[in-house]
Structure formats: structure tokens, C-alpha cells
Image (tube, coloured by chain):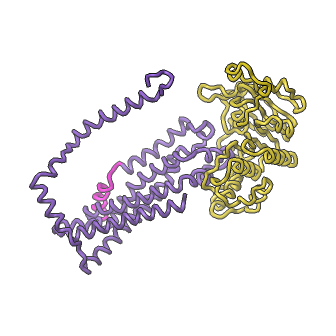
Amino acid sequence: MSIRLHGASLRHGQVLALDGIDLCIEAGERVAIIGPSGAGKSSLLHLMASALRPSSGRLELLGEQPWTLSGRARQRLRARVGLVHQAPPLPPRQRVVTAVLAGRLGQWGTLRGLANLICPLDVPGARQALADLGLADKLFVQCGQLSGGQLQRVGIARALYQRPQVLLADEPVSAMDPVLADHSLGLLNRHADVNGVTLVASLHAVELALAHFPRVIGIRDGKVAFDCPADAVTQALLDALYANEQLLAQQPVPGPSLVVQIPRC
Amino acid sequence: MLIPNARDPATLPRLLLMLLALVLLWPGLQLSELNPGVLLEAENRRQMGNFVSAFWPPAHEREFLDLLLEATLQTLAVATVGMAMALLLAVPASLLASRALSLGAASRGGRPGFWSQTLRLPIRGLLVFLRSVPEIVWALLFVRAVGLGPTAGVLAIAITYSGMLGKVYAEIFESVDQRPTHALLQAGSGRLGAFFYGILPSAASELVSYTVYRWECAVRASVVMGFVGAGGLGQQIDLSMRMFAGAEVASMLLTFLVLVFFADQLSRLLRGRLT
């Protein structure tokens, strides 16, 4: 058992982002989360990563309950979980090599982390992680000089370099072109498959989710709309998932091309 | 503003705040007894004129210049050693006082919890205490304790400036983008690691700029403390003013100008390297 949620809810101020989610993800499973913008996909991944504390309900992560642990033990548990952010939060002045090597800060002691800041300790490791994503030439460039898609790949490289047991990815390819997006998702899936890593990724592009992941979870209004194998996802399920009442009310005559609304950002 | 569709809800509070600021300014003028008219009275004008007319040409005898150089070096040394000692206390205190490294805040969307804030209060209190007493008062105290000379100035600067640096550093840490730090903390990193990898890259240029500015202030402060016997340029200015030697005062003021200009260039250079 890798990740388990028992009636987990999350409140951002007045807004109920997640409403009583029950989920169970086995070790080594690969799962895609899809759903309309603002449905709670990001919140769900942050909750699974123990980055956010559920307002109510329970989270079990790698057989432990992160929110009953002491701070130190929780940090140790978090070091075994990787989270890829949609817009990777990297300081613009940090060099790519440092940003990637920072993935193992949780496993290194503070002194090793400081030494690595003065002189990168594992340049080959960082280069390998970047080379898999076609970014080896950007090793010593500052993060601020990269485009959104390149930054996303640096974020993926950092998470892969961390070598986590659970890899969570929040829209990891939203700023990439279709070919790169396909390649990067393929890489994440191969990495997960080979190393027995549990992979959960939220995606906007339904076709990518169906092509790469054996199991797909649909989220709408903070609730699980469906949870089934990829080949059981039907057009009817998708239409219901992405139906947009507000836009439909404004445009009473939707053209035939608007039947499936898949927002891209 | 009157058309409901284009109304900005922030307009009214902003207008009220502006009015409040103006209303508060008036009693301030009254209380400070500001009256620029006295500057223009004949007697006062003549006094100032006499003093200033002695400024030109600035003193430049060989003997005086040697003295000036020694005093300048002493002033610089007092400011630099004082700052170094202040940093020893300010850096750890700022790390402890800043909410930027709170583990709780990282998993609560940036809002620190009750304990997280309460435990930081004593550190903030210490920093307030350190900087609330002006350095000139500390200097007077230390001149009595350790005798006349630069040591009193160094100690006074170390104490006051550690309070100022600690407070502002802590706030600079909080003002940069917090997401890199939170992401690192959420990935299991320790706090110090998260600070060096998440905050420092964004805060470095701001920190350097403020530190060099404070060093410049420390140079000026050590001059003022010279007046109460803490050595350096201040003591020389005090002596020259008592002897109504305007030319010597002018030379020393020119030295200040050069020092501040130098500090400004240094700050610009370092900032340029860091951005």
C-alpha cells in the first residue's frame, strides 16, 4: 500500500477544495488524475505529498500517517516522496545543476548540502538526469534564463534525481510541445515501471492520460467522479467530467467542435 | 467611481487612509516646533556665514593630512569591526526570528501557526531591545566602562546594529518568493538547507545592498560617537570645531563625501555581481 486517503477534505479559507476523498493507490501503480480547471487536482496531489495537511480525514503514506508523526520523522518520510510542480518554484538566480542536486537535500545532511552549494558534488548525476530530458547543455545556466517548458523539465529532473518511492506530478508537461510532453511522460512512466515507483500525475490532456497510464481518476468539484482502468474511460464519462455550465449558459448554441472542452492551461 | 459597473471596491478605503495620513501630519508639525523663519534672521545668518566662510580653502598641511588619514582609518576600522561583530549575532537571530523557515507555515499555505509565532516573539523582543537604545547612549556607557577610545565605539555599533540587521534580514527573508523554500521543506529538506537553496539565491543582492548601506551608516555613527570620546574622525571634528578651524572641518567633511561615495560604488558593484 503506497497512498491511502480516508474521507480526506481540504479547505482553502471558505472554499472546499476537496470533499471527502477516499482513494487507495498500491505500490508501483501508475495513475493519471484528470478533471476540469479548479476541480482540485493540484490540491489532491499536494495532499498526497503531505505538503498540505487535510482539514479532516486521514492520509496514509508508505504505511505511515505523516500528520501524526513528529516534525523530524515527517521530514524523513517526505524525503521518500517526490513532487513535481506545475511551475517549478526555482529561484531565478540558481543554476540548473544546483536546482537538480537540491532534490536530495532531504537525504543529505546539512553539511553536505552546504558543501554542494559551494562546489556541486555530483555533476555526472545531475547531467544524466537532465540528459534523459534533452537538457544536458543547460547544466550551468541560471534557471531564470529558461523557458516554461525547460523549467518543467528541470523540475522533473530534480524529482527523478531525488529517487523517491512515490512520485507525484502536478501537470508536469503543461508548458511543453506535444512531442516533448509525450517523451517526458514516457520517461516518467518508464522510470516508475523499472524502479517500482508509484507514479501519480495530474494532466490536462486527456489523450496523454489515456495513452500512458493504466488507471485514470476523474476529479470534479473536489470529488472523485470516476476511477477506472484507462480502457474503461468512455466519451460519456469525459463529457460529464468536463461539462461547463457557466460557459454553456452564456453560449446557448455550442458548435459541434465544442462538444468536448479540454482546457489547456 | 459613480457608475456601479466600474466601481473599484478599494477606492474608498484608500481615500480615507490618505486623509488620515494628512490629518496625522499636522500635529506632528506643531509638536516638532518647525519654524524655518529663524534661519533667515540677520544675527543667525551672520553666525553661520562666519563659520562657513572659513571652510575655503580646506586644510591641507602635511601634518594635518597625516592626522586625517589616521583618524579616517580608525573610523573605518571601528565601523567594520563593529559590523562584523553585529553580524555574528544578527545572522543567527534573523534565521530564528524569520517566519520564512517555519515548517508549519510551509504546509499551511504560508500562514504560521500559533506556536510558531509565539516562540519567535522572544527573539523579536531581543532584537527590539538591542536596537531601541541609540548607539550614542551605548557609547557613553562604554566610554565609562572601557575608557576613551575606539573600543567603546565598536561595542556600541555591534550592539545596536545587530538589532537592526537582524530585524531587516528576517524581513528580507520573508519578502522573497517563498515557494522555492516551501517546495524544499515539503520534499524533506532541513530548514538550513531550505534557506541556502530556496531563500538565499533570491535574497542575496538585497542582503548585500542593505549590509553595505548599514556599513555606511556605521561609518557615520562612529563619527558621531567620536564626539563623546570614542576616537576616529568624530573626535577630530569635535576638536576642530571647538577651535573654530573651519578649514579642517571642511577637509573632514570632504573625506566623508569620499567615504560615502566609495560605499555607494561598492554596493553597486556587489549588486551587479549578484543580479
Q: Nearer the viewer, residue A36 or B176?
A: A36
Instruction: Point out the residue furthest to the bottom here.
Output: B62
**Residue A149 placed where, x, y %?**
71, 48
Residue A134, compared with residue B248, is above or below; it is: above
Tell me, yes or no, if residue A77 can be seen here.
no
Q: Which residues are magenta?
A: B132-146
Residue A137, located in which quarter of the rendered image?
bottom right
Work out which quarter of the rendered image holds the C terminus of chain B and state it.
Answer: bottom right
Answer with left or right where residue B220 lies relative to residue A15: left
- At a point 46% along the width and 46% down the height, the residue shown is B123
- In the picture, one chain is purple; tell me its letter: B
Q: Is residue B141 magenta?
A: yes
Chain A, chosen colour in render: yellow
Most frequent secondary structure within the magenta stretch: helix
Tell me, yes or no, if residue B230 can be seen here.
yes
Residue B81, compared with residue A80, is above or below; it is: below
Counting every numbered tag in the picture gives 0
**Residue B47 placed where, x, y %?**
12, 59
Residue B127, compared with residue A259, is above or below; it is: below
Work out which quarter of the rendered image holds the N terminus of chain B and state it.
Answer: top left
Q: Nearer the viewer, residue B156 or B220?
A: B220
- At a point 34% along the width and 66% down the height, the residue shown is B151
Answer with left or right where residue A141 lies relative to residue B207: right
- At a point 59% along the width and 51% down the height, the residue shown is B195
Q: Nearer the viewer, residue A237 or A4?
A: A237
Answer with left or right where residue B58 lies relative to residue A168: left
Q: Is residue B269 magenta?
A: no
Instruction: Point out the residue furthest to the left here.
Output: B43
